[in-house]
Amino acid sequence: MHIKIYLLTSIFICKLLSAQEAVNLKIVQKEKKIYINYDLIGNYDYLEVRLFISKNDGKKWEGPLKYVSGDIGEKISTGRNKIVVWDVLAEREKFQGDWIFGFELIPSDNFISGNTEINKFQILDKYKSASIALECLAFYNLENLFDTIVDPDTNKILQEDFTPHGPKNFNSQRYYHKLHNMAYVISKLGKEITPHGPSVIGVCEIENRQVLEDLVRQESIANKKYKIVQHEGPDKRGIDCALLYDPLHFQLTASKSVRLTIPNSDDFFTRDQLVVSGNMLGEKIHFIVIHWPSRRGGEEKSRPKRIEAAKLSKSLIDSLQLVDPNAKVILMGDFNDDPISPSIKDVLKAKGEMINVKDGELFNTMGEHYKKGIGTLAYRDQWNLFDQFIVTSSLLDKKKVYDDLTFYRSIIFNKPFLKNKKGNFKGYPFRTYVGSTFMGGYSDHFPVYLFLVKKV
C-alpha cells in the first residue's frame, strides 16, 4: 500500500523539569518506512525514548510505536545524529492524512526507578519535513578470500596455501562456505537505517576478480547486482583491493590503480591503491580503497612503509582537490594503523573531531569510536581500529542543512555472530582459519560502514 503524508510535522515531548530536548528534526518517507533524524540533548547521559503519533493535533496519542528500530527505547545516550526507523505497515494498515509525531523523553533515573508517568507535555518545536536521501558505504577486509586454484605465479607467498592439497586443505566446500559468510555479512550492513543496504563496498584481501564474481552471485546479495572494479597488483601475497558498487546508486566514470614504491627498496611489493570516481545522488564523488603495509616485524620497524603509503594516499587526494578544491573524496580501507598513528595523524593530518576540521582538511570519521576503545580487530589482548573512513571537509555539513552530499555517521559492525563465543579469544572476530585449522567463521576484521545524506 502506498503511503501518503500531506503535512508532516513533529512535536517533541518531555518532562518540563527535566530540560531534555530532541532537536534538529529531519523526517523522510522512503518506500514503506519513515526515517526520523534528531539530536538528543539534556542534562542526563541516557534517556528512554518512545515514539507516538497523533491524528488530531495531539489531543489523542497512539503508541508507543512498536515496529521501530535505531535510537529508540531504553538507555539512549544523549548526543547528535540519532535516527529512528518506523516500519509503517507493520504497525498500521494505512497511514494517510495529516499526522504529527511525538517523542516521549524520560530521564534515565526515572525509568530506572520505574517512574514513567508524564504529567505534562511541552511543545518544544515544530518542523515541516523535507525528503532526505540516504546512501550507505562500507568497507570490509575479507581476510584471504582466495579461490582453490594454484596460482601460476611462483613468486606469490600463498601460491598453494589455499588449495585442496595445500596446508589449509581449502576445498570447494570451504570456499563456498567462505563466500556465503562474506555475502551474509554484507547483506546485513546498514539495514537498520536504509533498506537497500550498501551502495558501495570497498574490500581488500581478495585474490582476483573471479572470487568477487562468485561473491556477488551469492543468494543473499545477488539481487543487488553489484558491479566490480578491480585491478591486479604486485602484492607478494597475491591480494588486491577492489570496489563493489550498485549501479542504481553509483555511476562509475573512471578508475585507476596506483602503485606504491619505496626508494631504495626494489624488492618491495604491496597492494596498489585503487581510485574510483563516479556520481552519486547527482554529485561527483571519489573513493580511494587502500590496504597499507602490515605491521609484520613490529609496528615501529614497519612504520616507515605505512608513512610512505600515507604520502601516496595524501598525494592522490591532493591531486583530486587540485582539479576541484571542493572534491568529495572518501579514503577507506585497512590502514594497519590507528587513528592516532603518525601515518594518519601527522602525514594525512586527519582530525578526529569534526568541529576542528577546516576547509581543505581531512576528517577521520572513526575518531570517536577509537576514543571509546572500540576496535575492528584484536591482537594479543589489544584492540586496534585499522578499518577507517577518512573524508574531505567538502563532505561535512556542520550546520546540518544537507543541501549537498554529506557525511552523517560511521558504524563498526560487530554483531555477536561475528565474534568468538568462548575460549581465550572470546569476543575477538570469528575467523575462517586460525593457522591451518578451519574455524568456519568470517574474518579477523569487523566491517565498517557510514551513511551519506542529502536533501532531495
Image (spheres, grey):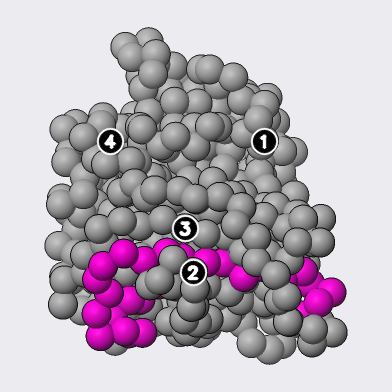
Q: Label 2 belongs to which residue? A: 58
Please state if 451 lies on the left or on the right of 133 as rendered. right
Along the line of sight, which residue is nearer the eye, 259 or 77? Answer: 77
Badge 4 marks a residue whose secondary structure is strand
Q: Which of marks 3 and 2 is nearer the N terminus?
A: 3
* Mark in front: 1 vs 3: 3
Q: Whole-percent x and y of residue 273? A: 38, 35
Does 234 sit above or below residue 80? above
- The span from disc 3 to disc 2 (Cα, nearest Å) is 10 Å
Along the line of sight, which residue is nearer the eye, 369 or 55? Answer: 55
Residue 384 circle label: none
Badge 1 marks a residue whose secondary structure is loop
Task: Identify residue type, mark 3.
Answer: Ser
* Mark in front: 3 vs 4: 3
Q: Whole-percent x and y of residue 216? A: 21, 66
Task: Identify residue type, mark 4.
Answer: Val
Which residue occupies 27% across, 41% down? Answer: 456
Q: How crowded is mark 3: few (under 14 residues within 10 Å), some or many (20 or more)?
A: many
Does 313 sit above or below residue 301? above
Which residue occupies 25% across, 31% down? Answer: 283
Does 233 sit above or below residue 172? above
Q: Label 4 belongs to which residue? A: 276
Q: Label 3 belongs to which residue? A: 10
Which residue occupies 49% across, 37% down? Answer: 400
Q: Label 1 belongs to which residue? A: 353
Which residue occupies 75% across, 49% down? Answer: 371
